Amino acid sequence: MINIHGVNALYKFEMARTFRTLAQSIVSPVLSTSLYFVVFGSAIGSRMSEVDGVPYGAFLVPGLIMLSILTESIANASFGIYFPRFIGTIYEVLSAPMSPLEIVIGYVGAATSKSLLIGVIILATASLFVPLEIRHPWVMLLFLTLTSLSFSLFGFIIGIWADSFEKLQVIPLLIITPLTFLGGSFYSISMLPPLWQTLTLFNPVVYLVSGFRWSFYEIADVNVGVSLAMTLLFLLICCVILYWVFKTGYRLKK
Amino acid sequence: MQPIIQIENLSKVYANGFTALKSINLDIREGEIIALLGPNGAGKTTLISIVCGIVKASSGSVRIGGYDNVKQYRAARSLIGLVPQELATDSFESVNSTFKLSRGLFGKAPDQAWLDQVLKDLSLFDKKHEWIIRLSGGMKRRVMIGKALAHQPRILFLDEPTAGVDVELRQDMWQLVRRLREDGVTIILTTHYLEEAEEMADRIGVINKGELMLVEDKQVLMRKLGEKRLFLHLTQTLAKIPEALAAFQLDLSEDGLTLIYRYDKQGEHSDITQLLGAIEAAGLRWRDLDTEQHSLEEIFVNLVRK
Ligand SMILES: Nc1ncnc2c1ncn2[C@@H]1O[C@H](COP(=O)(O)OP(=O)(O)OP(=O)(O)O)[C@@H](O)[C@H]1O
Ligand SMILES: [Mg+2]
């Protein structure tokens, strides 16, 4: 038995919030992506003709999409659950006949949908700047979806863990931003000194970006199978943490 | 008939070690209105929150409609609607969209006709598409009630529904509660006002320091506790109470201007007519009178002292 009306209502309610703020939710990633193109693609890229046989501007696209997806997924999903906790409206979801899984599908499903939407919009924006080629569209879609989903789950966990707006910001700021910038969005790992190449392999973002870029150009820092496995592993870890959160009522129930 | 809610040996110790509920046992009958009275911090909200699944019990069990509220939470929770004590509303959502969410969350198929009915019952129909942030405090409270009614619950929890509410809304609320009860909805409300409990409830439970001191039919309780006082404001100062009035066991205020008569609310021992007659016969004149009921706090003092 599943409370299908409940999931549906929660998902729609969350999506309505997205669409109400559509302009700002879309303008900002589009704007920042365009800026990256101008700065990195044109200014720097003109001196850095190709990476692994791909023009630098085009090389950047998958990484930039991932960058936005990561940030947006975490921001939207963490805010989506933190805010009702903060203003107290969470009581209703907690007292409703909703299973933890249904609650997660509602909130995280909406955040994931939004990220996918943003990903597609950035892709469209990017195609205005550089000629794009997607060799494996389905693989691309798979990585896009898995990344949106896992980082929305991750954001959801942050939103449950945080008990202040500062804490809500701190993980994205202190951990995610450095990881994404060092995750090979703007360069190929092979351009780094050997020690850094090894260290980089501990950065989960590397696998996402690499796999995602492979779906475009068939160039990768790590084998695409490894990328997929690591992405799934991250997804699994998030699921396990969430399972524990609901099982113990951590920060949701006193 | 099986009680619609069965609370057994329910205890709650909060994470900080504070014991908020001590082994509560309470059966709530289907279709009744039960009022939970108690001073601030007594544990009323904690009790309601555990029944509704927002707070975890430390020990004991709750059955709702025969379903365990933890193991069979789906069946149990779909029966209840909760209006919490604190105002908690979305800001940039329309009234109607939050109603739709509430209805859906509790597993009910969309039914705009019903939502419209609820909106009308709560005089919110003209605010249907208004953002909640643009509503007044009282209207927000109505929205919270409407959200709880959106899914047609069989059991309704009202945690201090009339705190900070104007007279008109309070009356509306009482009317609504009566109407719901006619439809067979079981209602559990908390309040600090004995008057409110008296007006609305079939049974009254008194909670103090996490303990359920008593649960009693209203009639019985009112007789036990509902002492009233009548103040007679005299035109002249009185040095002492005349002998002729000794039978009424009056008190005299310090300034000698007011006679105080204590009588039972239920009327069995109230001889106000005789008292007034006797006062006139004693040659005393009064310019005004008023009555006062024991406040809940006073009743508590009485209750706890015994
Ligand atoms: N999360 C919490 N952690 C620790 N103690 C708590 C928590 N919530 C409530 N309490 C304590 O439990 C006691 C009962 O609180 P509760 O809110 O149930 O009282 P109440 O009867 O509803 O009071 P009021 O009439 O003021 O609403 C209080 O002493 C309160 O301080
Ligand atoms: Mg309370």
Image (cartoon, coloured by chain):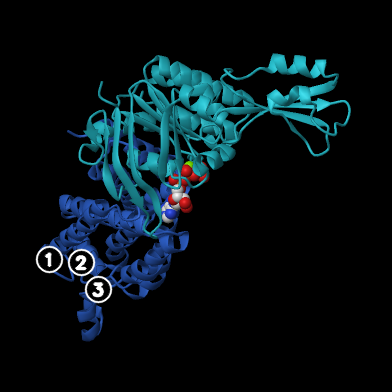
Q: Which mark sits nearer the N-terminus, 1 or 2?
A: 2
Q: Do discs 3 and 1 share a chain? A: yes
Q: Closer to the camera, A137 or B72?
A: B72
Q: Quadrant of residue B260?
A: top right
- The chain that hosts pointer 1 is A
Q: CA distance from mark 3 to mark 1?
A: 17 Å
Chain B display color: cyan
Location of mark 2 (residue): A207
Q: Does residue B10 appear left or right of residue A214 in this picture?
A: right
Q: Badge 2: how crowded within 10 Å, few (<14), some, or many (20+)? A: many
Q: Is residue B226 above or below residue A138?
A: above
Q: Nearer the viewer, mark 2 or mark 3?
A: 2
| Whether the residue under disc 3 has CB within 8 Å of ligand 1 | no
Query: Could you say where residue B181 lies in the image, as x and y percent from the top left?
Result: 42, 18
Q: CA distance from mark 1 to mark 2?
A: 7 Å
Query: Could you say where residue B159 lies in the image, as x and y percent from the top left?
Result: 47, 36
Q: Nearer the viewer, mark 3 or mark 1?
A: 1
Q: Secondary structure at mark 3?
A: loop
Q: Secondary structure at mark 2?
A: helix
Q: Which mark sits nearer the N-terminus, 3 or 1?
A: 3
Q: Is residue A51 above or below residue B84?
A: below
Q: Which chain is blue?
A: A
| Whether the residue under disc 1 has CB within 8 Å of ligand 1 | no
Location of mark 3 (residue): A188
Q: Amino acid at mark 3?
A: Ser
Q: Amino acid at mark 2?
A: Tyr
Q: Does residue B162 appear left or right of residue A89 in this picture?
A: right
- The chain that hosts pointer 2 is A
- The chain that hosts pointer 3 is A
